Amino acid sequence: MRTIMVINAKGGVGKSTLATSIAGYFASNWDAVTSLADYDPQASSLDWLARRPPERDKIHGVDAHKHGLTHLDRHTDFLIIDAPARAHGSELTQFIRHAETIIVPVLPSPIDINAAAKFITELLDVGKVERKEVKVAVVANRVRENLLIYDELEKFLDTLKVPVIARLRDTQNYIRAYSRGLGVHELPEYLSWPDQEQWEPLVKWMESKRSQP
């Protein structure tokens, strides 16, 4: 089973938006069983799943906030985990236990970037990550054109050998996709082609050996 976790200790950074689009991508592009586990008490990913049209490729929802992964479909090939905010210390260690690939979305503000740097430093100290049993990457989220604010974060992450895999633009397409229970790749191509281009390095990384321990 391939397990991808979207996590950041700071709330409001687009974890659920990213997790749902990743789940939509694998469900619609791979002949495989895809599950989406929502650990967030707000249950945004499960709400998205409830909006998903029945004719679309099925994604199995797991209310992980209430049940953990005990209700996970045993035939799952791809498990996407939407982790909760404010995970630190022993709780963070427990979450990482389930992951082999971790994606950290970061917003373009000094507060978010500073918080992300601290969180990633803590994340790299978790035993499983330190032993290189998990691969970690950052996604710059809701980026406006010509924004250079991520440069310092990228320099810092480079010293830690954590790649910034993709920069995703700030667009209404993610709201359109969420409200319809779709991933951004499942929107009509005339709407989503710029986003699919921006997702290409992230998709290639997730599908490659480089994203797996």
Image (cartoon, grey):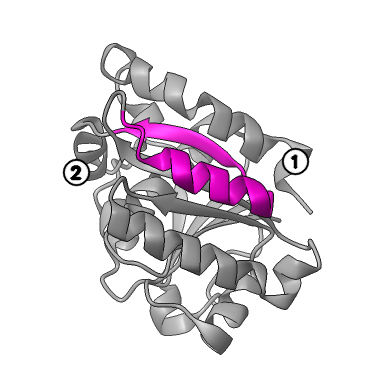
Instruction: From this view, report whether residue 134 is shown above or below residue 128.
Output: above
Looking at the image, tell me whether mark 2 or mark 1 is earlier in sequence order.
Answer: 2
Residue 112: x %, y % from top left: 33, 58
Q: Distance from label 2 to label 1 (Cα)?
A: 33 Å
Q: Residues within 10 Å of mark 1 (few under 14, many from 20)?
A: few
Q: Secondary structure at mark 2?
A: helix
Q: Which mark is residue 182?
A: none
Q: Secondary structure at mark 1?
A: helix
Identify which residue is drawn at 54% across, 41% down.
164
**Is there any visible trace of residue 23 in the rendered image?**
no
**Is there any visible trace of residue 205 in the rendered image?**
yes
Identify which residue is drawn at 26% across, 17% down.
191
In contact (CB < 8 Å): disc 2 and disc 1: no
Instruction: From this view, report whether residue 123 is shown above or below residue 28.
Output: below
Residue 21: x %, y % from top left: 40, 41
Region in magenta: 147-169
